[in-house]
Image (cartoon, helix red, strand yellow):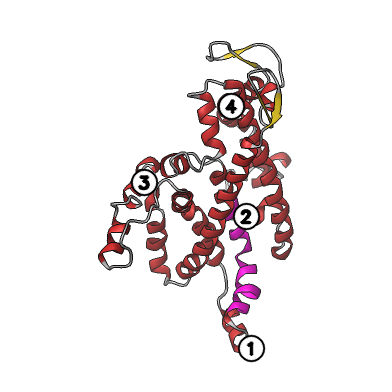
Amino acid sequence: MATPGRATAIPAPESEEASSTSPARRQRQAGQGSWWSGIPGFVYLIALVLFPLIIILIYSFLSRAKLGVGVKWEFTLTPYTELLYSESLSGGRSFDPTYLQIIANSFWYAIITSIVCLVLAIPIAMWLATRPPERRTLLVFAVTIPFWTSLLIRTYSFIIILNDNGPINGALQAVGIIDEPIPMLYTPFATVVGLVYTFLPFMILPIYASAERFDFRLAEAAYDLGAGKWTVLRRVVLPSVRPGVIAGLVLVFIPALGSYLAPELLGGGKSSMIANVIAAQFGASRNWPFGAALSVLLLVITLLVLVVFALVAKRASRATGRGGWESLL
């Protein structure tokens, strides 16, 4: 009851505009002009990604300088024809499959690396996913420990391990399995070992992320219904972790295709890949246009591989109800 002689304070009604403004609308209004925050990202992409790619593309259509340093600003398709043909001293051209063979070798090494990493990563990831929750973080942390050390140092360490006088040959000779050292260093085997060691964590982590969400009671139910181990793996487990498998293949195959250190240091030049040839063209050979053409070719191959993986991911996502690359996350 209001006191006589004193005015009663009546709250003023909110304006219609203020009362109708929802929290989401106020948040959108507060976020107006937020596109400015994306400018650093655009500058980074243009200056450090797009601009260098444009330079490489332009260089791939230029002529080689006479002194072998830089380029001559004359348009030509010679850098691309050199991929298929070699020119003799007399000026004649003949088909040369050397670079096609190097590209095929790069694909072959990348495929072998992806398969070996997949075979090793699936049981490791499933084992990690079945550990108690309080131990999983520590085990996943252990998988990432190799990233703490420089890749160059880790690759050099395998030169010691695979050497004729290294610990592997020493142990085999000590137990009497071999009488003479097995030549492992500077072979295709050493290249694959280096690639697998480098990219195995990139396969384990995506598969583990999918396996962690897998309901293992489904596997137990399959066993109770009489399914064997391989049937459970093929019909129950693998379809559930398929997004992680596809993501792991993308993260392993594409970097392995353009790998440089493993074939250079462990292969000893006997198992050259396309990245080694590109480095040689920009370095010792001083043929920048041809190196740029090889770089463009590698970029096109990578884009085609990504398209293939995207189509596979789209088909795999139908089972999970998500579309496109979302099934890989």
Nearer the observer: mark 1 or 4; the answer is 4
Mark positioned earlier in the residue sequence (1 or 4)? 1
Task: Identify residue for label 3.
Answer: 154
Q: Is 55 above or below relative to 186? A: above
The residue at 62%/44% (across/down) is 104
Quarter holding the N terminus? Answer: bottom right
Going by the numbered disc 1, the residue's amino acid type is Leu
Measured Cα–Cα span from mark 4 to mark 3: 28 Å
Mark positioned earlier in the residue sequence (3 or 1)? 3
Q: Is 208 above or below relative to 54? A: below
In x, y percent, where is residue 304?
Answer: 70, 43
Task: Identify residue for label 4.
Answer: 291
Nearer the observer: mark 4 or 3; the answer is 4
Task: Identify residue for label 1.
Answer: 225
Task: Identify residue for label 2.
Answer: 328
Looking at the image, which is closer to me, 113 or 35? Answer: 113
Looking at the image, which is closer to me, 236 or 80? Answer: 80
